[in-house]
């Protein structure tokens, strides 16, 4: 009983930290420091150590609410597409490992004890996720609308095998990282030449869509948006296929745990 109280306390502290830090940053207005230009200037100021500072920032800053998309885009603006992708991948992978183990050592034992011997739709969904963990995490990493840190915490809390978590994360972040780095590189070039808001205005209401599309950086940005749309449709389709396959394996939408209980009742009768 005493052990459970300690595990519950650790869980509460963890939730206070992961929710309180981003909320505190927002309430104090500190998010103004997480703009692309400010982060870029800060990392650049370290000159030779800039790649190390950038990787550390990619690992730690999202915990306090810094948007990972902006951080990844900064990598493209600072280091170019190739090195920006490499550094962003290292930072994203280390961030994933950190988030996983923070949740694993803080919440996993309490969550496991609290849900032990419970059979409901949530537990059935969790069992399904564990059985298909690699592909679900892989798709979630590619999907543009999933929350990176939330996935880390959920996997650690539910004790998804670390090896599966690591490799699905590593391979899953490659497409998105490359695209976001491309976006950062293109946006930086466009900002220097015309400004992103002026570009949007001229392409939408100014009648200069085709004219601006001849610019290689604008063309790259258009391709980035197309790729993100493809990622979204592709990953949602993948989720649908996996979920549908799981339902077919169970013979319908009824959770497997409920089916077992129903079978036991029939045997008893």
Image (cartoon, rainbow, N blue to C red):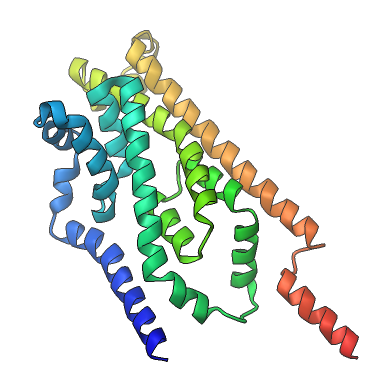
Q: Quadrant of residue 186?
A: top left
Give the answer, above or below, for where 51 lies relative to 161.
Answer: above
Look at 39% across and 85% down and name the residue there.
Answer: 3
Give the answer, above or below, for where 107 lies relative to 184.
Answer: below
Give the answer, above or below, for where 86 lies relative to 128.
Answer: above
Q: Relative to the observer, which residue lies in front, 192 or 108?
A: 108
- Residue 205 seen anywhere in this rendered image of the structure: no
Residue 126 in percent (x, y) is at 59, 65
Residue 78 in percent (x, y) is at 22, 25
Q: Quadrant of residue 255?
A: bottom right
Q: How many marks?
A: 0
- Name the image quarter holding the C terminus: bottom right
- Name the image quarter holding the N terminus: bottom left
Look at 74% across and 52% down and name the residue there.
Answer: 245
In the image, is 34 to the left or to the right of 213?
left
Residue 187 in percent (x, y) is at 28, 24
Residue 193 in percent (x, y) is at 20, 15
In the image, is 211 to the left or to the right of 250?
left
Look at 50% across and 39% down and name the residue there.
Answer: 172
- Residue 3 seen anywhere in this rendered image of the structure: yes
Look at 31% across and 27% down and name the residue there.
Answer: 84
Give the answer, above or below, for where 193 lies relative to 76.
Answer: above
In the image, is 12 to the left or to the right of 39?
right
Q: Residue furthest left?
A: 45
Q: Relative to the observer, which residue lies in front, 235 or 164?
A: 164
């Amino acid at each position: 009983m005493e052990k459970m109280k300690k595990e519950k306390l650790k869980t509460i502290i963890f939730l206070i930290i992961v929710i309180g830090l981003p909320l505190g940053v927002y309430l104090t207005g500190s998010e103004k420091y997480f703009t692309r230009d400010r982060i870029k200037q800060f990392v650049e100021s370290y000159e030779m150590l800039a790649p190390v500072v950038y990787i550390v920032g990619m690992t730690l800053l999202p915990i306090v609410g810094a948007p990972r998309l902006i951080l990844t885009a900064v990598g493209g603006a600072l280091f170019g597409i190739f090195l920006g992708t490499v550094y962003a991948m290292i930072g994203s992978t280390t961030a994933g490992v950190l988030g996983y183990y923070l949740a694993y050592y803080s919440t996993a034992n309490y969550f496991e004890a609290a849900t032990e011997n419970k059979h409901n739709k949530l537990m059935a969904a969790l069992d399904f996720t564990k059985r298909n963990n690699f592909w679900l995490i892989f798709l979630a990493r590619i999907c543009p609308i999933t929350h990176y840190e939330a996935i880390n915490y959920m996997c650690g809390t539910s004790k998804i095998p670390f090896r599966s978590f690591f490799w699905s994360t590593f391979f899953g972040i490659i497409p998105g990282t490359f695209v976001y780095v491309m976006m950062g590189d293109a946006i930086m070039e466009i900002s220097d030449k015309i400004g992103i808001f002026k570009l949007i205005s001229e392409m939408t209401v100014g009648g200069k869509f085709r004219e601006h599309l001849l610019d290689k950086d604008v063309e790259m940005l258009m391709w980035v948006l197309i790729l993100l749309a493809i990622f979204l449709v592709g990953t949602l389709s993948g989720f649908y296929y996996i979920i549908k396959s799981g339902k077919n394996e169970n013979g319908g939408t009824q959770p497997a745990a409920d089916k077992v209980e129903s079978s036991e009742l029939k045997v008893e009768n």
